[in-house]
Amino acid sequence: MIRNRKGLIIEALMRIIIMVVLVVIVFNIGKKVAEAAFGGNDALQSLDNLANEMNSLQERRSTQAFLSMDEGMTIIGFSKSGNEFRCYGCQQATIAAPSQNVLYSSITKPPNKECSNSACICACFKSTLNQEPSGNFKINCESISCKSLKFDVPKKISLETALESQNIQLGGMYPYWENGFMFARRKVGANTPLNGMLYNDERKITLYIEKKLANNEILVAACPLAPCIQEQK
């Protein structure tokens, strides 16, 4: 009788252990699926932190900020009035003899509540590029998450200063951003966007954020190297 009781207890314990192991396995699988679809927790938290820093930054200030990015992830800022963000010359920055025609990569501003009637910043997960018959590129996202910005972003941000600081002389027109800003994590040869600053496969990147009065309007921006905001002619 005692042996039977011991056997039942051992069997019950084994069942409990098996159930705990199965729960852990299912939880980890679910976590990996969620991260694949919506990005890792630190990447989403990084988006929140950057939006909060840009919203709380004092006027006439520029400071360093940091981004944690998943592989294939692109961070894009959208202006309040622009229908799409464009990155002019960004895919051509790595070409030794680029075309005379300046091509651009673009992505339509998301129609979500965070970006409606507001500037916003978005994390585009598993971003890819499709080249159109015109030669220009469309940026696609497997999923996207956005945060609203309290102030508008510049209509144009040039990358000339940032590229020259890295001793990159293009000898012609430098890449620039229109209706927003962009940071990308991309491996060499991958079909993912470039932001004009050549290849970056670092998980954590350093950038600058800035807020100041320009063209009679308080603007906020992010860029590889301050100053981000210039007076528009």
Image (cartoon, helix red, strand yellow):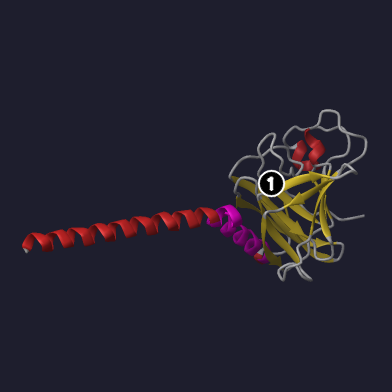
Which residue is the site of mark 1? 184
Is the residue 221 above or below the residue 216 in the image?
Answer: above
Is residue 177 on the magenta stretch?
Answer: no
Extreme residue in the left direction: 1
Residue type at mark 1: give it.
Answer: Ala
Q: Residue at x 24, y 57 (%)?
A: 14
Say which quadrant the N terminus sits in: bottom left
Query: Residue 25 or 108: which is nearer the viewer?
Result: 25
Q: Kindly indicate the quadrant of the structure image that contains residue 114.
A: bottom right
Residue 73 x/y as whole percent: 65, 49
- Circle 1 — which element? strand
Say whether residue 3 is left or right of residue 111: left
Number of numbered discs overlaid on the protein picture = 1
Mark 1 Cα-neighbour bin, 10 Å: few <14, some 14–19, many ≥20: many
> Which is nearer the eye, 11 or 186?
11
60, 156: nearer the viewer: 156
| Residue 199, x across and y down, in percent | 69, 37
Q: Is residue 180 left or right of residue 21?
A: right
Q: Measured from the top left, where is residue 133 in percent x and y?
A: 89, 43
Q: In which quadrant will I find the C terminus? A: bottom right
Residues shaded magenta: 34-55
- The spot of residue 182 in percent (x, y) is 73, 51
Is residue 221 at least partly visible in the picture? no
Residue at 74% in and 67% down: 115
Q: Please tell me whether residue 42 belongs to the stretch shown in magenta.
A: yes
Q: Main secondary structure of the magenta part?
A: helix
Q: Is residue 3 visible?
A: yes
